[in-house]
Amino acid sequence: MFDYLIVGAGFAGSVLAERLANQLGKKVLICDRRPHIAGNAYDHYNDEGVLIHRYGPHIFHTNSRDVFEYLSNFTEWRRYEHRVLASVDGQLVPMPINLDTINKLYGLNLNSFEVEKFFASVAEPKEYIRTSEDVVVSKVGRELYEKFFRNYTHKQWGIDPSELDKSVTARVPTRTNRDDRYFTDTYQAMPLHGFTRMFENLLMHPNIKVMLNTDYREIQQMIPYREMIYTGPIDEFFEYRFGKLPYRSLNFKHETLNTPTHQSAAVINYPNEHLYTRVTEFKYLTGQEHTKTSIVYEFPTDEGDPYYPVPRSENTERYKQYKTLADVTPNVHFVGRLATYKYYNMDQVVAQALAVYAKLADHSRWQPQQNGRVLAATNQTV
Ligand code: FAD
Ligand code: UDP
């Protein structure tokens, strides 16, 4: 009898497996329908020996000391600060928009003070910032919005920024200084030997059994367990009873090139050209030295694996219906980006999983003991 069946071996599932096994001595079966662990953070060496991220570029960054220290138990780190260029008006300029972006784009020589005045002169103040269009236009005006955000967002999400929640484009700041880092978090680093190795370490415990190529529905009736942790799409769990929740997907086109370096930054965004949004060159992220280099193009699509919940009010309302049902579904805990329908970064998923663990641990402590075993909150008899 397993104490927990965990569905999905991404960050949410693997962190919970580790905590429950390691800290509470629980017996855990973790399954994933994919042929590998690590969820969307999965990385591997391709046929040419270059370390690539199968599901697009994953860069770790967090302000949470707890999350960073927790993960540091399972990996060493390589310092890495991410930088992105955007291809706009025939030039490659820093993204997020900063002082150098404006000077290069318009052939100016402004200082920080002057660029602040420039933004103020072009910004269109809004009483309520509600949408992804409002966020940008109210800060940098319509022209820069059109050049950097409107088409990229439309390509990425399949809808106009005016129909998307403000939180989406608010992920990308605007700066008046020359800081060209994509993130400013306190902790920015990549797992020294890759994400998958870190996941192997997370799951390396005698109480954890891993089953790959397995949809939980294939084993649910055959393998006894007390509680489930579910990290897949929440609407799928409930067989779409309130209708489908949209998850945006991507087609990845991976290429390996016979040259040590391909482009001048880790990521180049193409807001206004091509069907893809961005091109990533992995060696910048991984620090690997190799005579060849590998890149990936991201083509957004509605079909395919669910990657991004789509933050807009009608989806939030539908998610709330599923959440209400989830709250009264006994012995199942919904965790992670797909199961809680939140546009979370990796560190936020780790923090969420640790918070769920803390609740489960608390609960477990207060359960009556029977035959030396902790009885979980379930109707099943031991
Ligand atoms: P997932 O990693 O999706 O894991 C869920 C797992 O559940 C999957 O492996 C799936 O196969 C499995 N599953 C689902 N249903 C079933 C079922 N019925 N039976 C068995 N298994 C099932 N975050 C960052 O912090 N930095 C970044 O730079 C970054 N870049 C990203 C780039 C892209 C292109 C994408 C798509 C995401 C990016 N993220 C990034 C976000 C990051 O991928 C997520 O925050 C994180 O991986 C979510 O972990 P999770 O465990 O919730 O979900
Ligand atoms: N975005 C944009 N232009 C860019 C970069 C980002 O319009 O050059 C918008 C777009 O809507 C994107 C969002 O900002 O989906 C968040 O960007 P981020 O790089 O965080 O996206 P992710 O890495 O999660 O795909």
Image (cartoon, rainbow, N blue to C red):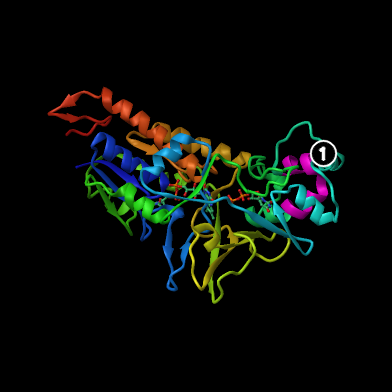
- In which quadrant is the N terminus drawn? top left
Residue with the most extreme left position: 371
Q: Decide whether residue 362 is among the magenta residues.
A: no
Camera-side residue of 318 and 368: 368
The region drawn magenta spans: 133-150
Tag 1 residue: 113
Q: Residue at x 70, y 40 (%)?
A: 131
Camera-side residue of 57 and 240: 57
Residue 118 is left or right of residue 285, and the answer is right
- In which quadrant is the C terminus drawn? top left
Q: Could you say where residue 148 lies in the image, as x and y percent from the top left?
A: 74, 53
Q: Residue at x 85, y 41 (%)?
A: 114
Q: Residue at x 49, y 70 (%)?
A: 290
The amino acid pointed to by label 1 is Phe
Q: Residue at x 62, y 39 (%)?
A: 313
**Label 1: how many residues lie within 10 Å, few (<14), some (14-19) or many (20+)?**
few
Which quadrant of the structure image shows residue 129? top right
Q: Main secondary structure of the magenta part?
A: helix
Residue 201 is left or right of residue 297, and the answer is left
Q: Decide whether residue 146 is among the magenta residues.
A: yes
Query: Looking at the image, can residue 362 be seen?
Result: yes
49 up-or-down from 147: above or below: below
Q: Could you say where residue 67 lies in the image, as x and y percent from the top left?
A: 44, 38
Q: Could you say where residue 228 lies in the image, as x and y percent from the top left?
A: 32, 40
Q: Could you say where residue 28 lies in the image, as x and y percent from the top left?
A: 26, 44
